[in-house]
Image (spheres, rainbow, N blue to C red):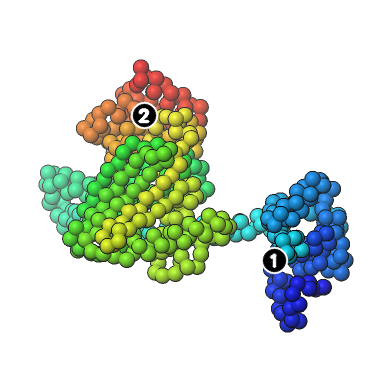
Amino acid sequence: MSKSIDFEKPTATQLRALSKTVDMVSESVEIMDADGLLRFVNRSFQNVTGYTADEALGRSAVELLASEAQNTELFDAIWATLREGNPWHGEFEGRRRDGETYRQLVRIAPVLHDGKLAYAVALKTPIDELAMTQERLKTASEHLVATGSMVVVGQLAAAMGHEINNPAQVLRSCLEHLSERGEYISSGELGEVVTDALTALRRIETVAAELTPFSSTESEETHPIDINVSVRHALRLAHNEIRHRASIEEKLQEAPFVDGLEGRMIQLITGLLVFVARAMVEDAPGNALRVSTRAEDGETCVELACTLGAPTPYFEELAARIRIWEGDRVENPQTGITADFMQGSTKWIGLIFCQQIVVAHGGSIEVTTSDDQLSATIEIRLPASEQAEVAAVRVLVIDDEELILRSLGRMLRREYLVDVCSGGELALEMIVEGDYDVILCDIMMPGLSGVALYERLADVCPEARERVIFISAGTFTDKTQSFADGTSQPVLLKPVRRDDLRTAIESLLKRVRG
C-alpha cells in the first residue's frame, strides 16, 4: 500500500486499520483530489489495472485508466455532477497497464469541504466479476427454490399419504380377496373386485399426477397460463391439509393470463395454502379461508383471505418479514435473501421459496392483518400476459410420459396456450373446468386410456368430444384398433412433426367453429 490521505489528522493506528479494511474489499477503491489526481488506491486496484500504488499515485486517473473509446464529454459530465455534491454511477471502459481494456461498473461519491469538492471516492467492479457474482446469486436462488419446493412437499406428505393410503387399502383388500378365493370366485364377484381395484389404482395415479408440478424446473420456457387452473390444482393438492382446519370458499373470476411456468405457479399457491392451514389454530371454531382471483389495473390478483377462530402471530410475523425483504430487494436488487428473513423454523424456507417465485414472475406479494389478529389476507399480484390475446387457442395435452408432455408442450407453446396432464382421471377434471379448444390425447395410457377418456366425456362434458385429437405410438389392442379405424376424430402417429400437428389443430378448429 502507499500513501494515505490527510483528512482530519487521524491517528496512525486508525490509518492502518482503514488501509487494511479497504485492502480486503474485492472492488477497486480509488480516492482522487479535486483535480482528478489519484491520492489513494487499494490492492484490488493494483490487481485489476496492473499498476502499483507508486506508479498510480499523483497521476490523473483519467489519463492513466481511461481507454481511447471514452470521450471528454463523459468525464466533464461526471466531474460536474461531483462538484454539485451528487454521486455518479454507470458503466465505464477501463484500460490496464498492458493496454487491454475491460468493462466496469463505477460508483463515485463526492467528499465536500466547506461546500466545495475536496475528494472523490470511486468504487469499481469489473463487469465479468459482477456477472460471476450474479451467476452465483442465481445458482443460490435456484438452490433455495429447490429446497423450498422439497419443504412444501414434505409438509404435504402426510395429507397426500392419506389420499394414497385409502385407495391403497382398497387395492390391497381386493388383491387379498382374489388370492383367497382363487378359482372359487364367481364371475359377478370377480367383476366387482376388479372394478374396485382399478378405481383405487386410478385414484393413486391421479394423486401422483397432481404432484407433477413439484418436478418443474426453471429450464422450461415461460408461456401464458390460466391462473384459475393453477389455483384449482393447488386447492386439490392442499385440500386435506386445509379441510381439517378451516372451511374453504372458492371465488374465482375471469382474469388475464400471466406469463410464467405453470408448475412454479402451482407450487407457489400450494405453498401458501399449506402455510395458511398450518398457521391457523387447529379446531378453533370459525376458521375459514376464501381463495379468490380477479383482474385489477392490468394485473391478475390471487387473494387468500383468512378468518381466524383464534388469534395467531404467524401472519403478522410473515407480513413484517415480507416488508423487510421487499424493502431490501428494492434498495439493492443484488442482495439476495437476508439472514433475518431466514431465521426461525423451516416454515420460513417454504415462504422464501414462494417469495422467490413471485419475484421471478415479475409480481409482488403483500400480507395484511387485523389489529386483533383474527383476520389476515395474502395477496399476490402478477402482470398480465402480453401474449394472451394473440395465443387465444387453449390446448390440453394428455400423455402418460413426462418427456412426451414436455416435448409436445415446447412444440405448441409458440402459438397456443398449453396445459399438460399425465393422468386420464385428472384430465377429466381439467376438461370440465378448463373449456379447452383442443384436447390432444394419447390413445394408449395405463389406467384411464384415451379411448376410455373419450367415452367418459359423453357423460361429463359431451361438447368436448369433438375437440379431441388422438396421438399414438402406433401400438393398438384390438379394442383401440377398432376405435381408431372407426372414429371421426383425427388420429396422429408419433413421431409427429410440428407442421403436421399445427395443421391438424387448425383443421379441427375450423371444423368445430364452422
- The residue that disc 1 covers is 26
Question: How many neighbours does mark 2 have within 10 angstroms: few (below 14), some (14-19), or many (20 or more)?
Answer: many
**Residue identifier under label 2:** 437
Amino acid at pointer 1: Ser
Q: Which amino acid, by three-letter code, is at mark 2?
A: Asp
In the picture, the quarter occupied by the N terminus is: bottom right
Q: Which residue is drawn at the image coordinates 50% and 33% (left, top)? A: 414
Residue 440: numbered disc: none
Q: Residue furthest front?
A: 114
Q: Position of residue 495 (x, y in %)?
A: 48, 34
Q: Quadrant of the C terminus?
A: top left
Specify the farthest residue to the top.
Answer: 514
- Against 296, residue 393 (above or below) is above
* Residue 54: quarter of image: bottom right
Q: Is residue 387 above or below residue 142?
A: above
Mark 2 against mark 1, which lies toward the viewer? 1
Residue 210 appears in the rendering: no
Residues packed near mark 1 inside 10 Å, few (<14), some (14 to 19) or many (20 plus)? some
List x then y, in percent, for residue 226: 38, 39
- The reply, left or right, for residue 242 in relation to residue 87 is left
C-alpha distance separating marks 2 and 1: 56 Å
Where, by quadrant of the figure, is residue 512 drawn?
A: top left
What residue do we see at 39% from left, 32% from top? 394
| Secondary structure at numbered mark 2 | loop
Position of residue 66 in the picture relative to residue 295 (left or right): right
The location of residue 227, given as percent across then percent down, is: 38, 42
- Residue at 29 percent of width and 32 percent of height: 454
Task: Identify which residue is drawn at 36% across, 29% down.
Answer: 437
In the image shown, does 146 or 320 lie closer to the viewer?
320
Position of residue 229 measured from the top left corner of the image (x, y, whole percent): 35, 41
